Amino acid sequence: MKKKIVIDLPVNTDQCRSKAMQIAVRSPGVISVNIDKEKDHLVVIGIGVDFFRLMHCIRRKFKCSRIVSIEEVKEEKKPEPEKPKEPCPCPSICNPCVQYYPICQPVYDTYDNPTCSIM
């Protein structure tokens, strides 16, 4: 189950932002990490991410960080494009497809045995 964890991280320099991203990426289960510079938020998306352990690691470096929200991410199913229909293997001509059957010839066996009672 994917979770989206938004962390308030008031940092001013790009070096501090990159350090926070490196700390978040090292956590197991993290899929993506983004920084919203306008709101000073670190957005972590992952499967089975332990947010307590993540916050513990981030707070070692950034003392005033706090969790803003934790929510489940629902994956949107994209409709699959319909496959074009395959054309008929028969050529498009006026005559319908004709199927030919092999002609079977009867087989006559000559019996040289005169003891046959049926004949």
Image: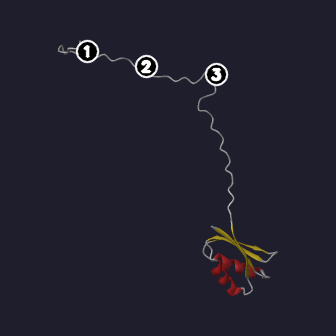
Residue 94 is labelled as 3
| Quadrant of the frame with the C terminus | top left
Question: In the drawing, does residue 42 fall left or right of residue 29?
Answer: right
Identify which residue is drawn at 75% across, 86% down: 64
> CB under 8 Å between callouts 2 and 3?
no
Where's residue 49, x and y in %?
A: 63, 74
Q: Tell me the kind of residue under disc 2.
A: Ile
Assign a secondary structure to mark 2.
loop
Q: Tell me the kind of residue under disc 1.
A: Thr
Where's residue 100, x and y in %?
A: 50, 22
Ranked by sequence position, the earlier of labels 1 and 3 is 3
Residue 52 is labelled as none
Assign a secondary structure to mark 3.
loop
Q: How far apart are marks 1 and 3 (CA)?
A: 48 Å
Identify which residue is drawn at 31% across, 16% down: 108
Assign a secondary structure to mark 1.
loop
Ranked by sequence position, the earlier of labels 2 and 3 is 3
Ranked by sequence position, the earlier of labels 1 and 2 is 2
Identify which residue is drawn at 67% across, 50% down: 80
Q: Mark 2 points at which residue?
A: 103
Q: Distance between the residues labelled 1 and 2?
A: 22 Å
Residue 98 quadrant: top right
Q: Name the residue under label 1.
A: 110
Q: In this view, does 70 lie above or below 76?
A: below
